[in-house]
Image (cartoon, helix red, strand yellow):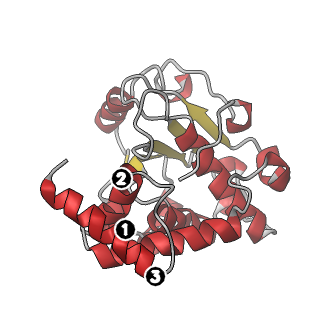
Amino acid sequence: MEKSQELALTQMRKSVEKLGFSTEKYGDPTLMRFLIARSMDTQKAAKMFVRWLEWRSSMVPNGFIAEAEVPDQLEARKIFLQDSSKTGYPVLIVKACKHFPPKDLIQFKKFVIYILDKTLASSVKGRELGNEKLIGILDFQQITYKNVDARGLITGFQFLQAYFPERLAKLYILHMPRFFVSVWRMVSRFIEKATLEKIVIVTNEDEKKCFIDEVGEEAVPVEYGGRAKLTAIQDVVVLPLEG
């Protein structure tokens, strides 16, 4: 680690303590994610970290979201989790045609946390704790107007940006229909530039080949041109990951 990074981490830890919180339980890789997300500004990173601690204690008091807390969302079997030996990152697949705007917004928010926590926990194997990232695939195939949920999409991106900094390696969007383009433009206004730069909208065969090559055939489902069989996220067994 560079001297400048070590100094920034020390200053950030002091700033967090001044705000009345402790960094004792968290390693350098975790704190570094917050620093990178705030362009190495130690005070902004400390504030972001404290907001994250407060949010976790409020939304996830037990350290993880139990499946019993999100039964309606799990029932749809719309989220899938694949392993990728090529990238080393887990691949999270969202089938938008199985999603409908939620009646219970709190349960939906908990479901977003459940998805992200479980996906990141599945990536720990052989990695330094705190450095886990994920690859996302958002599949809009066969969606209708009934599936459109701009608020749900915005919630997902806001959670990623505010509470899961530097966790997204890349996000691929597949089969976006023409009618959804205007919705996506509106949603994009809530997405930070750094996040937008990690999003690839796959629109033709060349881009599709690129996507399969980057993610790895072993992680891309057969229906997208790969070799993998889809596994629903609730069928994947992982140990909970905190931080």
User: Measured from the top left, where is residue 226 in percent x and y?
Assistant: 47, 22
How packed mark 2 is, by other alpha carbons closer than 10 Å (few <14, some 14-19, many 20 or more), is some
> Total of numbered circles in the picture?
3
C-alpha distance separating marks 3 and 2: 19 Å
Q: Residue at x 49, y 34 (%)?
A: 124
User: Measured from the top left, where is residue 186 in percent x and y?
Assistant: 46, 74
Seen from the viewer's position, the closer of residues 74 and 173 is 74
- Identify the secondary structure beneath mark 1: helix
- Identify the secondary structure beneath mark 2: helix
Question: Disc number at residue 28?
Answer: 2
Which is nearer the N-term, disc 2 or disc 1? 1
Q: Residue at x 77, y 63 (%)?
A: 107
Question: Disc number at residue 13?
Answer: 1
User: Measured from the top left, where is residue 120 in percent x and y?
Assistant: 53, 43
Give the amino acid at mark 1.
Answer: Arg
Question: Disc number at residue 85?
Answer: none
Residue contact between numbered discs 3 and 1, judged by CB atoms under 8 Å: no
The residue pinned by badge 3 equals: 19
Give the amino acid at mark 3.
Answer: Leu
Which is nearer the N-term, disc 3 or disc 1? 1
In-image side of 28 versus 183 (left or right)? left
Rendering quarter of residue 229? top right
C-alpha distance separating marks 3 and 1: 10 Å
In-image side of 120 versus 196 (left or right)? right
> Is 225 situated above or below 25?
above
